Amino acid sequence: MSVIVKRVGEAVEVLQGASSLPEGEEIVLFTASDLIDLDRERREEVDLQMPSFLRGAEDEDAEEMFHR
């Protein structure tokens, strides 16, 4: 889905891509920097969990296995 919008005062006008939006559903738009930050946070969480996942030690916190 690709949508181009423009802020007009306090409103947002959809310039292109309105047909790709789901009918009657609310959507949330993120800036590129927002998405980069969200992805970084998600990767940090996964990185902390990955060692215990690979070992199968689901009760063990990954931070306990590695000293930073």
Image (cartoon, helix red, strand yellow):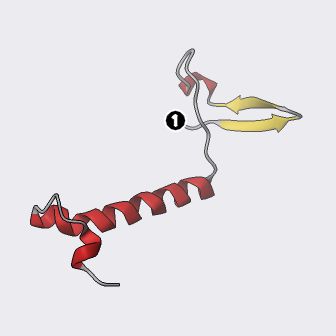
Q: Nearer the viewer, residue 41 or 34?
A: 41
What residue sits 77% from the left and 32% below the top?
12
Spot occupied by residue 25 in the image (x, y as percentages of width and height)? 55, 20
Locate residue 68, reporting x and y percent: 35, 84
- Specify the farthest residue to the left: 56
Q: Which residue is mark 1?
A: 1
Front residue of 13/36: it is 36
Q: Is residue 29 above or below residue 37?
A: above
Please, which residue is most extreme toward the right here?
Answer: 9
Q: At x 72% / y 36%, what residue is drawn?
A: 5
Rendering coords of residue 17 (x, y %): 62, 30
Q: Residue at x 40, y 65 (%)?
A: 44
Quadrant of residue 11 within the rendered picture: top right
User: What kind of residue is marked 1?
Assistant: Met
Is 33 placed above or below 17 here? below
Secondary structure category for the residue under label 1: loop
For label 1, count other residues whose C-alpha is less than 10 Å away and answer few (under 14), some (14-19) or many (20+).
Answer: few
The residue shown at (51%, 35%) is 1
Residue 26: image quadrant is top right
Above or below, 5 against 67 in this view is above
Q: 38 or 31: which is nearer to us? A: 38
Total numbered labels: 1
Q: In the image as oriented, which residue stretches furthest toward the bottom?
A: 68
